[in-house]
Image: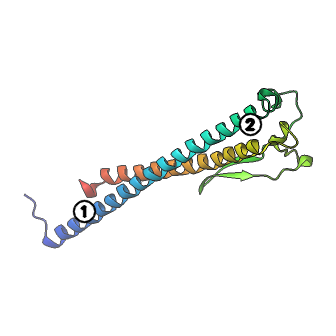
């Protein structure tokens, strides 16, 4: 049997305690991230449903498919345009980059495909769907943070400190 000197045992014990504390902190972070991610997904669902209801209200109140229909959405034969928002993936996470409407640069307002003066319910639906885009980016970032926390937990559990 190998005899370990007393100071070495106390160092080992304190390292294990520190690793255990770090693991506890990581699990706590993970649970908070799961909670935030779940809330974000719930908000996304509500926002999307609200936008869909507003869109249905617009169609109902303003003449069915006459006001808002897929036939009004541009096709391959339509004039080209640029997207008003883009997903940008950086080291800080995913974010949404929005452009101002500028016809000369090809940035057109999609709302005007349906009408020059769109009804308020359609404008509100557009705002709900824009909020959905932001929530998707937030959800993606939370999911990435959750993955990083899980990776850290896995690495720490495999380390020699907790063996």
Q: Which secondary structure lies at badge 2?
A: helix
**Residue closest to the far left:** 1
**What percent of the width, then of the height, locates residue 90?**
63, 53
**Residue closest to the far right:** 104
Label disc, if present, on residue 140 of the rendered structure = none
Direction from residue 156 to residue 72 in the image, left or right: right
161 to 63, vertically: above or below: below
Q: Which secondary structure lies at badge 1?
A: helix
59 to 142, vertically: above or below: above
**What percent of the width, then of the height, locates residue 123?**
76, 45
Gap between marks 1 and 2 measured at Cα: 62 Å
The residue tagged 1 is 16
Using the image as rendered, state which of residue 95 and residue 8 is in the foreground: 95
7 to 154, vertically: above or below: below
Residue at 51% of width from left, 45% of height from top? 42
Marks 1, 2: nearer the viewer: 2
**What percent of the width, then of the height, locates residue 134?**
63, 50
Quarter in which the N terminus is drawn: bottom left
Using the image as rendered, state which of residue 7 and residue 109 is in the foreground: 109
The residue tagged 2 is 58
């Amino acid at each position: 049997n190998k005899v370990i000197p007393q100071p070495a045992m106390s160092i080992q014990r304190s390292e294990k305690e520190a690793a255990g504390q770090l693991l506890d902190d990581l699990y706590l972070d993970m649970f908070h991230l799961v909670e935030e991610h779940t809330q974000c997904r719930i908000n996304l669902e509500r926002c999307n449903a609200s936008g869909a209801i507003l869109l249905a209200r617009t169609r109902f109140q303003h003449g069915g498919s006459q006001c808002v229909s897929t036939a009004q959405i541009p096709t391959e034969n339509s004039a080209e345009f640029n997207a008003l928002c883009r997903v940008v993936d950086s080291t800080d996470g995913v974010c949404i980059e929005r452009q101002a409407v500028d016809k000369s640069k090809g940035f057109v307002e999609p709302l005007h495909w349906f009408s020059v003066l769109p009804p308020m319910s359609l404008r509100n639906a557009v705002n709900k769907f824009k909020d959905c885009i932001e929530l998707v980016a937030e959800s993606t970032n939370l999911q990435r943070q959750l993955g990083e926390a899980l990776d850290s937990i896995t690495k720490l559990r495999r380390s020699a400190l907790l063996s």
